[in-house]
Image (cartoon, grey):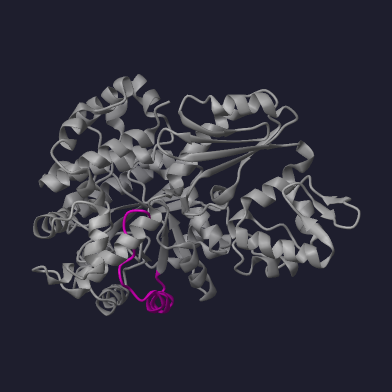
Amino acid sequence: MVQNRDIARVFYEIADILDLLGDRFKTRAYRRAARSIEGLSEHLADIAARGALEEIPGVGKAISGKIQEFLKTGKVKALDELRRKVSPGLIEILRIPEVGPRTVQTLHEKLGISTIEELQKALEEHRIRDLPGFGERSEESIRRNLELYLKQRQRRPLSSAYHLAQKLLKILREVPGVEQIEPAGSLRRWRETVGDLDILIASEKPVPIMKAFTEISDVKQVLAHGSTKSSIILSDGMQVDLRVVKPENFGAALQYFTGSKAHNIVLRRIAQKRKWKLSEYSLSDTKDGSVIAQRTEAEIYEALGMSWVPPELREDTGEIEAAQKNQLPKLVELGDIRGDLHVHTKWSDGRDTVEAMAKAAIQRGYEYIVISDHSKRVRIAKGLAEEKLREQIEEIRKIDEALTDIRILSGVEVEILSDGTLDLTDDALAETDVVTASIHFDTRGSEEEMTERFLQAMENKYVDILAHPTGRLVGQRPSYSVNLDKLMEAAKRHGVFLEINSYRFDLSAVEARRARERGLKLAVNSDAHWAMGLEIMKFGVAVARRGWLEAGDVINTLSFTKLRQIFKHIH
């Protein structure tokens, strides 16, 4: 069973090797295609079967051919040829965040570094700082990013793990005897990265379920095959653990295996004080073994003297105390979202037209959508200069008049330049409905420099939203240096809304919670670059929920009438 992620990995590796060989143009093309493929909810084989591969953003004739080659043969000849040109160790070093091909080439040529282990040794011996153009600061940056890479190497971004889990759940639901099925562990808590998958099933007939699980076509290795627990390794290296329990134990098992460990430890202590025992089977009395609760999670939490805690909050960060006082927030839900304030179209680096994006938003039940294509500084994304932006605004107004089921707002994702000024004139910004400001270039400045750029940008009276304000891209790029507390203070002062970006996971849940505690309201956006990309809004909502946000904390849960009251210049 070939997965979309398998093909995405092929293109990421092609891009890495081309990076080392100095072919920057093709590198960008393959990375863009890989990112699009990762975000698909539909299987590539099905897309190929209906001849629609070239409708995927970034997928042209050449890349489409390679996808079909992989679907037929399980490999791509072009990748095999490229692998023979570069050491595998250098490719892995290139995957370290912020370590580019020129750095890798210098490390290889000057210090003979060809593997991660050799890089670690060079860092320990402080040999990198002596290279021309490096220094202590560069060496420390490489060390920090290497630590991040090694930490995340064994974990997968939530979106990838989520789509894999959905495919497995679909297969297992069809097995006779399955009464209930849920993912557990960090996936159910919607953590931004997932180490392995935990699946829990309620059934009176576990044996055929275990057989079906261990015989899934994508299984590379069966680690364990028991009557109630089995573990497999899929072809891409992901471990999946399946547990089958009796229906009456399902609630206790789901609570136990969802975690987190820290959350469960506190619950067990509360149970112990009452002379009870909390396990994966039940909450029971230690004296006589009688069952107090087991069938549902809600029963267990209620018996322990608290309201049910949503899985996203189970990290022992105050949720238990709040549940005991019945003071947990009513978390924002995907269904609360009434519009998307940050999407791209063919006018810049998106795949679909304004009309296609709007119609996709209508299908999701949205009341409004903001078209936020890049400004001219982002040349790689065909960013819009003032005149082009005005042409787009005119088109948006016409389509908005034609489509009566949704309001289409003109916006722009304007680049914050290195001196803190914006990439477009105020006159041009004044013609839009919503201005989103962000940084994509010159991101290696000091904390003071990066913070000042944002602060100056927020002083512009037309700026409404600050997009992905830390620059983080989970699993690929760490945050740049910025004083987020100062940004939050300025955002509140100027009436600017910070963004939770559903693709980048920037802000993080911890940062979103800090913003809420400061009284800020946030925007949860998809940053979608094609119509199907709107669906990743669920990951942004997950961040908001993990950050304790309620619907009232998110501006795009507002009706359009109320939304236009808080923005500065909707026409």
Q: Could you tell me if residue 47 is visible in this image?
A: yes
Where are the magenta residues, as a range? 474-496
Q: Residue furthest right?
A: 288
Residue 405 visible in the shown view? no
The quadrant where residue 429 appears:
bottom left
Tell which of 355 and 436 is nearer to you.
436
Q: Position of residue 408 (x, y in %)?
A: 38, 49
Question: On the image, which quarter does residue 274 sit in?
Answer: bottom right
The quadrant the N terminus occupies is top left
| Front-lying residue, 485 or 336 | 485
Q: Which residue shows up at 10% across the image and 69% down it?
A: 133
Q: Is residue 126 left or right of residue 131?
A: right
- Point out the image quarter for the C terminus: bottom left
Residue 264 at what x, y percent from top left? 67, 59
The x and y percentages for residue 105 are 12, 54
Q: Is residue 455 above or below residue 285?
A: below
Q: What is the count of numbered marks? A: 0
Judged left or right of residue 287, residue 371 is: left
Q: Is residue 214 left or right of residue 511?
A: right
What residue sits 41% from the left and 57% below the top? Answer: 505
